[in-house]
Image (cartoon, rainbow, N blue to C red):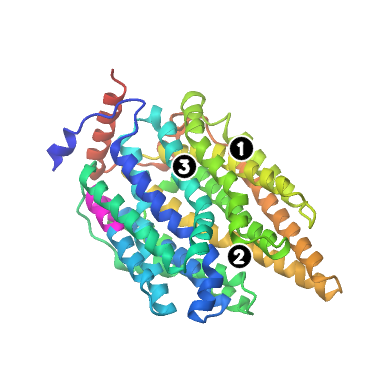
Amino acid sequence: MSAAIQERPAVQAGRTPTVVRLLVLATFVVILNETIMINAIPRLMDSLRITEQSAQWVTTAFMLTMAAVIPVTGWFLQRVTTRQAYATAMGVFLAGTVLSAVAPSFEVLLLGRIVQAAGTAVMLPLLMTSLMIVVPEHDRGRVMGNVSLAISVAPALGPAVSGLILQVGSWRLLFVVVLPIAALVTFFGLRKMDDISEPQVSSIDWLSVGVAAFGFGGLVYGLSLLGDSDGRVGLGIGTVVAGVAAIAIFVIRQLRLQRTGVPLMDMRILGHRTYTLSLLLMSVGFLAMLGSMILLPLYLQNLRGLSPLETGLLVMPGGLAMGVLGPTVGKIFDRFGSRPLVLPGSISTMLALAGFTQISMTMPYWQVLGLHALLMVSLAATFTPVFTLGLGGLPPHLYSHGSSMLGTLQQVAAAFGTALVVTVMSARSSHLIADGVAAVPAQVSGMKLAFGVATALALVTVLVAAKLPNRAADAGTQDEISAGTVPPADGAAIEKHSATTKNGAEGP
């Protein structure tokens, strides 16, 4: 196998490698599925005779599973070939989709969603790790722009696609439509995909697996309870505290394993300043995006009376603009670096969220659309360079660990963003209603305050963006020295392969 990998044709400059194209397509399908259930909650309540709190678990369980499984992917991706990882991820996803489509009860549907999430959890780290191995540094911005097209358009299309499907059929049709598409993507992907890295045989620390699952999964679950209106805030706080304690134990365990064995998630990635700053900016940016994604449907549907389909169509242009601009942002990054993009993008993100603090019952829909589009475009200008800078600031043998931590914290940020804005909105609304304010004005005021909190958090991204280097190479040497990282023997093959790929890509 090693010979086959080394003789693989060099990637030509200006072209996206086939393996990355296939992984982008598969990632698009699975991420689309993550948001496709948002508009199906009322149908689930009627069909399966469950409460709204129970129905929300089709999304909460997905995020919880992602947060619990992603920490293991760093070890898993180093242990198997690219084809094996792809086949495993898509096979598990297909099994979960079939189970969800035929689910006779809510419990079986929930199990199907958990199985789907386990497959989805592998895809994004696999895509990012593969991209960093096969794409030379000078071309990563352009390719990462194409990746962001899939990652950003999929969540935007999810609610709109589900709205269209639910117009003509039941919630089961959501899975029936996804199933053949995912099956075709899996079939053609396995036919065309080549292995791009050498598997490394290593043991796994099962204590770390258990503590990571409890810690990150418990943190996401606890954060989801904080936004509940069901009186479970106390349980949520207790679960969050327990999750944080478990994560602390997990980190201590990994630091010990780094000295004596193979860690499940290598904490040396946090010793690289560029990666750590990028991780912070991505997490807060993702938190702001998910917070707005939960607030806008509540505002448009509950207060302005729009249907789920109308809501999806209103917010879809922003997501599409974010995706369409992804390749252009990538090309600008390759040519000029991060400074013309990240700082202006962070400032515009803050301004868009500040604009949403002025929502009212009479705000024109074109203003809502415009603010949402500004938010999405600003995040597009930020995410692609930051993704590329962050992972590019790591040595090759830490790519899989870096992408795993990034994926894990995205899920935690999603749960925290949702819980934070809903809790702020509910607390403000309840306080005003208790003071005699009518329900609708109280809810509008609560949403304004929630957007205000999101705006304050976005200020953090501006401060972090000002500290980021223009290119990964600008801080690479400094990060290596400060981290004290010397690539181990098992990373030598990947480093050599990465250098060979880069040299070949820069040729004629």
Other-residue count near label 3 (Cα within 10 Å), few / some / many at <14 / 14–19 / ≥20:
many
Query: Could you tell me residue 265's position as x and y percent?
Result: 36, 55
Q: Which residue position is annotated with label 1? A: 345
Q: Earlier in the sequence, mark 1 or mark 3?
A: 3
Asked if residue 345 is positioned above or below residue 459 in the image, the reply reads: above
Other-residue count near label 2 (Cα within 10 Å), few / some / many at <14 / 14–19 / ≥20:
many
> Which region is colored magenta?
76-90
Front residue of 390 and 109: 109
Check disc 3 and report its element: helix, strand or loop.
Answer: helix
Q: Earlier in the sequence, mark 2 or mark 1?
A: 1
| Circle 3: residue type | Ser
Q: Magenta span has 84?
A: yes
Query: Could you tell me residue 123's position as x and y percent?
Result: 35, 52
| Residue at the image position 40 percent from the left and 35 percent from the top | 143
Query: Could you tell me residue 348's position as x and y percent?
Result: 66, 39
Spot the residue most to the front: 168
Q: Quadrant of the C terminus?
A: top left
Front residue of 134 and 295: 295
Does residue 246 appear anywhere in the picture?
A: no
| Circle 1: residue type | Gly
How far is mark 3 from mark 2, CA to CA?
Answer: 25 Å
Front residue of 138 and 496: 138
| Circle 2: residue type | Ala
How far is mark 1 from mark 3, CA to CA?
Answer: 15 Å
- Disc number placed over residue 419 in the picture, else none: 2
Q: Which residue position is annotated with label 3? A: 148
Q: Quadrant of the N terminus?
A: top left
Check disc 2 and report its element: helix, strand or loop.
Answer: helix
| Residue at the image position 56 percent from the left and 67 percent from the top | 223
Q: Magenta span has 188?
A: no
